[in-house]
Image (cartoon, rainbow, N blue to C red):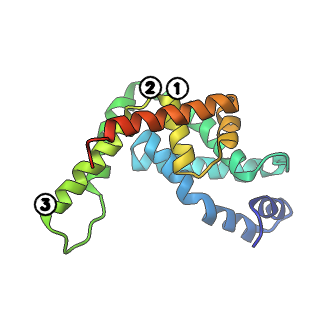
Amino acid sequence: MQTNEQLITAYQEGDFEAFEELYRRHKNALYRYFYRQVKNAAIAEELHQDVWMRIVKTSAVFNQQSLFTTWLFKIAHNRLIDYFRSNKHNTEQRAQEGNDDIINNLSSEPNQRPDNQLNEQQIAARVLQAVDELPEEQRETFLLHEHSGLSLKEIANITQVSFESSKSRLRYAVKKLRGQLRNLL
């Protein structure tokens, strides 16, 4: 199996199937990253597609000095910052609408008892709320680490902070989440 870096190099040389493989590998993690930040499926999809278009347009500038995932999420991080700057006034309303969508669309087994379904929905809603209540930097670090599987070094590179800052942000996020969710389960 080829590495991401080998695939992007093959794409740079004209192998379109290599790009399709990169897309298959990373589309879900990238979409989840956007969705958890903007809490709106349509906006997350728009940002998701925008990043992939930027990858297509700028693939020639990728070099082997960084990992493909670091480069991908760096582009995503910058696109998200641009989005928040241009849409500051609508962010709060979309956040609540997005949380309602997540709670209403929780997958559950069809034969599950209604009281169990409600309990799972309440737990999921509380977890989402706890993540949403994290300070922005901690939330982003947590999501990049947990949802995207990026290392602290990669997150530091993406967010342009030191490794120690990235490590602290994750540690504080996990500590706050544990504190907020301690009595939940």
From the image, state whether disc 2 or disc 3 is nearer to you: 3
Q: Amino acid at mark 2?
A: Lys
Q: Is residue 93 above or below residue 99?
A: above
Q: CA distance from mark 2 to mark 3?
A: 38 Å
The residue that mark 3 highlights is 115
The reply to whether residue 134 is visible in this rendering is yes
From the image, state whether disc 3 or disc 1 is nearer to you: 3
Q: Amino acid at mark 3?
A: Asp
Labels 3 and 1: the sequence-earlier one: 1
Q: In screen coordinates, is 49 left or right of 14?
A: left
- The picture quadrant where one finds residue 169 is top right
| Crowdedness near tag 3: few (<14), some (14–19) or many (≥20) residues, C-alpha within 10 Å | few
Who is closer to the viewer here, 48 or 147?
147
**Residues under numbered marks 1 and 2 in contact, where contact means CB atoms less than 8 Å apart:** yes
> Mark number for residue 88?
2
> Tag 1, which secondary structure?
helix
Q: Position of residue 32 (x, y in %)?
A: 49, 51
Which residue is at a point 32% across and 41% down the rendered structure image?
181
Q: CA distance from mark 1 to mark 2?
A: 6 Å
The residue that mark 1 highlights is 85
Who is closer to the viewer here, 62 or 60?
62
- The picture quadrant where one finds residue 132 is top left
Which residue is at a point 38% across and 30% down the rendered structure image?
90
> Mark number for residue 143?
none
| Crowdedness near tag 1: few (<14), some (14–19) or many (≥20) residues, C-alpha within 10 Å | few
Q: Position of residue 102 (x, y in %)?
A: 32, 51
Q: Is residue 134 above or below residue 182?
A: above
Q: Amino acid at mark 1?
A: Arg
Q: CA distance from mark 3 to mark 1?
A: 42 Å
- The picture quadrant where one finds residue 23 is bottom right
